[in-house]
């Protein structure tokens, strides 16, 4: 699978984390299928059953915007990028 996506969010660049997921998707699915994995510094630091818990728990230790939460599943169906902002 060849992906050429780039993701820039302000000063934070999560493209390396997303590229890590894409490059290792098959292996990650073997261990975390259906879970929401947290990727920081190009490694999985934890996994959770839902995205909300993943963000809340990881945010207790790491600053938001410095980690990627990705649903771990085979194929391309869950390869979407969603950004949440508190700005109205």
Image (spheres, rainbow, N blue to C red):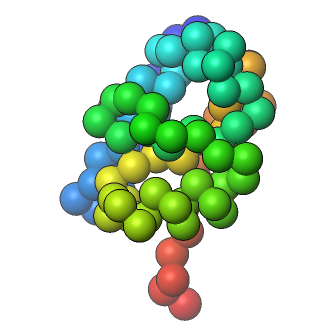
Give how far across and how far down residue 51 sits, in percent. Answer: 66, 55
- Of all residues shown, which one is farthest toward the bottom? 88
Residue at x 36% of width, y 40% of height:
40
Q: Is residue 45 left or right of residue 80?
A: left
Residue at x 74% of width, y 20% of height:
74
Q: Is residue 59 above or below residue 39?
A: below
Q: Is residue 88 left or right of residue 49?
A: left
- Residue 26: which quarter of the image? top right
Q: Quadrant of the C terminus?
A: bottom right
Give how far across and how far down residue 36 sits, in percent. Answer: 64, 42
Q: Is residue 10 above or below residue 88?
A: above
Q: Is residue 36 left or right of residue 59?
A: right
Q: Is residue 41 above or below residue 58?
A: above
Residue at x 59% of width, y 19% of height:
28
Count of marks overlaid on the render: 0
Give how far across and how far down residue 4 sits, in percent. Answer: 45, 23
Q: Is residue 63 above or below residue 49?
A: below
Q: Is residue 15 visible?
A: no
Give how far across and how far down residue 66 sits, in percent. Answer: 33, 54
Residue at x 30% of width, y 47% of height:
13
Q: Is residue 77 visible?
A: yes
Q: Quadrant of the N terminus?
A: top right
């Amino acid at each position: 699978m060849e992906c050429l996506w780039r993701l820039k969010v302000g000063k934070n660049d999560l493209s390396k984390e997303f590229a890590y997921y894409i490059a290792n998707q098959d292996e990650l699915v073997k261990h975390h299928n259906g879970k929401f994995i947290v990727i920081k510094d190009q490694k999985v630091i934890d996994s959770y059953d839902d995205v909300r818990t993943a963000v809340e728990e990881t945010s207790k230790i790491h600053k938001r915007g410095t980690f990627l939460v990705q649903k771990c599943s085979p194929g391309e169906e869950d390869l979407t990028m969603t950004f949440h902002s508190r700005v109205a």
